[in-house]
C-alpha cells in the first residue's frame, strides 16, 4: 500500500486568556489508498485535525508537527504557492452542510467549472462536458438542470452531491470529508456514502472520513481513529470494532440506544480524567 | 396537580397549511392519533415530513387548517389559554437556541412561575434543578457557562416546573453527543415514571424512538405512513416500503459486493 499522507505528532493550539490551549495533541497516522475514519465527540479535535492537514487552520491557531507530508511534500512550512498547487487539485475537502459551503450566488455549474479550470492543463472547452459527466457520476439524474441551478434550488442531498462532484472533478489523491452526511436524512446519507465508496474504489483515492457517528464510520471505513480531548485514544480496524479496548470507545459504542435490545437505563459514559492526559 | 380526566391527547384529521393559493404548502395532511395516560408516543420521519409541525400545531405555534386537537378530553382553544400551558409543555431540539443567552438559569425557571402565579418560587426552582440532576451551583449561571447536555436539562426543568401532565419533545437529543444523549434519555425515562407523564416525542432516529416510545407513527410528506408498536419496530415488522427503507438505513452502511 503506497502511503499518501504521513502525520506524526500533529499539534494544533489556539490562544486563550489562560495561555495557548492545545486542541489537537500528538495525532499520528499514515494514510494509504484507503478509507480512514476519525471519530470523536464535539471538541475532540477531529475537525481541527482535518483542517490542519489541508492548511485551513484559522490564522489565530498554530500548527506543529514532527512530520506532515503529502506524497513527499512537506506541508509544515508550505508556501502559499505550494498550497495553491495542492488544494483543490490534489487534496480537497467536503464540508458538513452544502447550505454553507456552496456559493449561494453562483450556479452549481459555474462553481464546478471554476474548480476544474484551476488546473493548468485543463482544456477550457471541455469543462462543461466534464462537469456534467461528474454530476452524473454522483448519481444526479438531471445533470443539465443541476448545472444551471443555484444552490437554494437543490435539496440537501443534491447540494451535497454537487459539492462532492466539485471536489472530485480534479481527481484528487486525498479527500477529507468532514461530517459529509450529518446534515442529510438517513436514506440520502447512505446514497452519498455509496457514491464516495465507489469513487474511492475506482480512483484509488485516500479518504479521511470525520464523524461523530462511530457506528456509521465503522460500517464504512477500513480503519478508525478514536479521538478524545485532542488525543488519539485508540486506533482500531473497523471490522474489529467490537474488540476495541479503550473504555472511551467501548463507552461510546455502549451508550447508544439500539433497535434490537431494550436496556434501561442506558449505560452512560463514565469519563476518566486520565483519558485526557 | 391531580391526574386530569379524559384522554391526554387526541388528534383527529389534523391538517396544517402554510400560505395560500398556488404557493400553499400542505405541511401536515389528515394526521390522527390518540395517546393514553402515562404513555410515550413517537413520531418518526425525515426532514420535511411534518413531524415537528404536528407538535407545533398542538401547542399553538402552527396554524391548524382542519381537524381537531383535544387535550384531556376538551378541544383546545385558539389562542391557547394559560390552563393549556399548565398541562402541556414543550422541549425544543436545540438547547443552544432555545435558552435566552442573557438570562440566568434562575430567571429562565422563575419566569413561567411568575406568569402562572405560583407561590414558593424558591423551593420550586431548587426542586426543579434537583429533579434534572443539576445542583444548586447551576442556578445563577448563564447558558454559555453550561454544556449542551446541561442546557437541555435546564430546558427540561423549565418545562417541568409548571408540573404539566404532558410533555411535547421535539428531537430532544439530536443536538447532543452520543454519551450525553444517553444521560438525557435516562432522565426523561425516569421522570416519566416518577410523575406519570405522557410524552409525545418527535425524532428522526428509530433507535431513540424504540427506546422511548411504546407506540409510534411514521410520517412522510405530511402524511401518516403507518402506525407501529415498539415490538413491531424491534422485530422490524413494517408493512410499508418506506418504513422498511428507514429500518434498513438504521443498520448503517452496507457495502455492495464489487
Image (cartoon, rainbow, N blue to C red):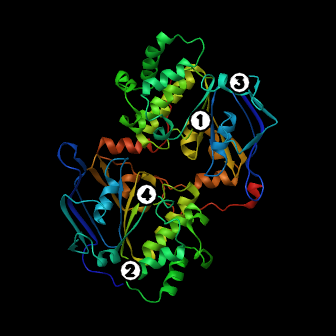
Question: In the structure shown, which secondary structural element does the residue marked by tag 3 occupy?
Answer: helix
- Quarter occupied by residue A27: top right
Question: Residue at position x 42%, y 57% from top?
Answer: B210
* Structural distance between the alpha carbons of marks 3 and 2: 62 Å
Residue nearer the viewer, A256 or B233: A256
Residue nearer the viewer, B244 or A60: A60
- In the image as oriented, which residue stretches furthest toward the bottom? B120
Q: How crowded is mark 1: few (under 14 residues within 10 Å), some or many (20 or more)?
A: many
Output the chain of dot 1.
A
Name the side, left or right, on which B117 lies relative to A1: left
**In the rendering, at what x and y percent does residue A231 appear?**
73, 48
Residue on which disc 4 sits: B171
Residue A78 in view in this figure: yes
Question: In the structure shown, which secondary structural element does the residue marked by tag 2 occupy?
Answer: helix
Screen quadrant of the C terminus of chain A: bottom right
* Structural distance between the alpha carbons of marks 2 and 4: 26 Å
**Residue A164 vertical placement versus A189 (above, below):** above
Verify CB contact (< 8 Å) between mark 4 and mark 1.
no
**In the rendering, at what x and y percent does residue A122 appear?**
55, 12
Disc ID at residue A221:
1
Residue on which disc 3 sits: A82
Residue on which disc 2 sits: B115
Residue A264 in view in this figure: no
Q: Residues within 10 Å of mark 3 (few under 14, many from 20)?
A: few
**Residue B209 vertical placement versus A200 (above, below):** below
Amino acid at each position: 500500500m503506497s502511503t499518501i499522507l504521513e502525520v506524526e505528532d500533529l499539534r494544533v493550539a489556539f490562544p486563550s486568556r489562560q495561555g495557548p490551549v492545545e486542541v489537537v495533541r500528538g495525532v499520528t497516522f499514515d494514510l494509504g489508498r484507503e478509507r480512514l475514519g476519525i471519530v470523536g465527540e464535539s471538541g475532540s479535535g477531529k475537525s481541527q485535525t482535518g483542517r490542519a492537514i489541508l492548511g485551513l487552520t484559522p490564522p489565530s491557531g498554530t500548527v506543529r508537527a514532527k512530520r506532515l507530508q503529502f506524497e513527499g511534500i512537506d506541508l509544515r512550512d508550505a508556501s502559499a504557492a505550494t498550497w495553491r498547487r495542492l488544494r483543490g487539485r490534489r487534496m480537497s475537502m467536503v464540508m458538513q452542510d452544502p447550505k454553507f459551503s456552496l456559493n449561494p450566488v453562483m450556479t452549481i455549474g459555474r462553481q464546478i467549472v471554476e474548480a476544474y479550470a484551476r488546473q493548468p492543463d485543463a482544456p477550457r472547452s471541455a469543462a462543461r462536458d466534464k462537469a456534467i459527466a461528474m454530476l452524473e457520476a454522483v448519481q444526479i439524474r438531471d445533470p443539465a438542470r443541476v448545472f444551471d441551478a443555484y444552490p437554494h434550488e437543490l435539496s440537501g442531498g443534491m447540494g451535497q452531491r454537487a459539492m462532492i462532484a466539485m471536489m472530485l472533478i480534479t481527481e484528487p489523491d486525498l479527500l477529507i470529508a468532514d461530517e459529509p452526511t450529518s446534515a442529510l436524512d438517513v436514506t440520502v446519507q447512505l446514497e452519498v456514502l455509496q457514491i464516495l465508496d465507489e469513487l474511492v474504489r475506482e480512483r484509488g483515492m485516500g479518504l479521511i472520513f470525520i464523524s461523530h457517528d462511530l457506528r456509521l464510520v465503522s460500517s464504512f471505513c477500513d480503519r478508525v481513529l478514536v479521538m478524545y480531548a485532542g488525543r488519539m485514544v485508540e486506533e482500531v480496524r473497523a471490522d474489529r470494532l467490537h474488540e476495541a479496548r479503550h473504555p472511551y470507545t467501548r463507552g461510546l459504542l455502549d451508550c447508544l440506544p439500539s433497535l434490537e435490545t431494550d436496556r434501561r437505563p442506558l449505560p452512560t459514559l463514565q469519563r476518566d480524567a486520565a483519558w485526557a492526559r | 396537580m391531580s391526574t386530569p380526566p379524559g384522554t391526554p391527547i387526541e388528534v383527529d384529521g389534523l391538517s396544517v397549511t402554510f400560505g395560500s393559493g398556488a404557493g400553499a404548502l400542505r405541511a401536515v395532511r389528515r394526521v390522527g392519533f390518540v395517546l393514553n395516560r402515562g404513555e410515550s408516543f413517537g413520531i418518526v420521519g425525515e426532514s420535511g415530513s411534518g413531524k415537528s409541525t404536528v407538535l407545533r400545531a398542538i401547542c399553538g405555534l402552527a396554524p391548524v387548517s382542519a381537524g381537531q386537537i383535544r387535550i384531556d378530553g376538551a378541544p383546545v382553544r385558539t389562542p391557547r389559554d394559560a390552563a393549556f400551558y399548565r398541562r402541556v409543555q414543550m422541549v425544543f431540539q436545540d438547547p443552544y437556541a432555545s435558552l435566552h443567552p442573557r438570562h440566568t438559569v434562575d430567571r429562565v425557571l422563575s419566569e413561567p412561575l411568575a406568569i402562572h402565579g405560583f407561590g414558593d418560587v424558591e423551593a420550586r426552582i431548587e426542586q426543579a434543578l434537583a429533579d434534572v440532576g443539576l445542583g444548586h451551583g447551576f442556578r445563577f449561571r448563564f447558558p454559555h457557562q453550561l454544556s449542551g447536555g446541561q442546557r437541555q436539562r435546564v430546558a427540561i426543568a423549565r418545562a417541568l416546573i409548571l408540573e404539566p401532565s404532558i410533555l411535547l419533545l421535539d428531537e430532544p437529543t439530536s443536538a447532543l453527543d452520543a454519551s450525553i444523549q444517553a444521560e438525557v434519555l435516562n432522565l426523561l425515562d425516569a421522570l416519566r415514571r416518577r410523575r406519570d407523564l405522557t410524552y409525545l416525542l418527535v425524532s428522526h432516529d428509530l433507535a431513540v424512538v424504540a427506546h422511548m416510545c411504546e407506540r409510534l407513527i411514521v410520517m412522510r410528506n405530511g402524511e401518516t405512513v403507518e402506525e407501529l408498536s415498539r415490538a413491531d419496530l424491534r422485530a422490524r415488522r413494517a408493512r410499508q416500503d418506506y418504513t422498511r427503507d428507514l429500518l434498513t438505513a438504521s443498520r448503517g452502511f452496507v457495502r455492495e459486493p464489487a
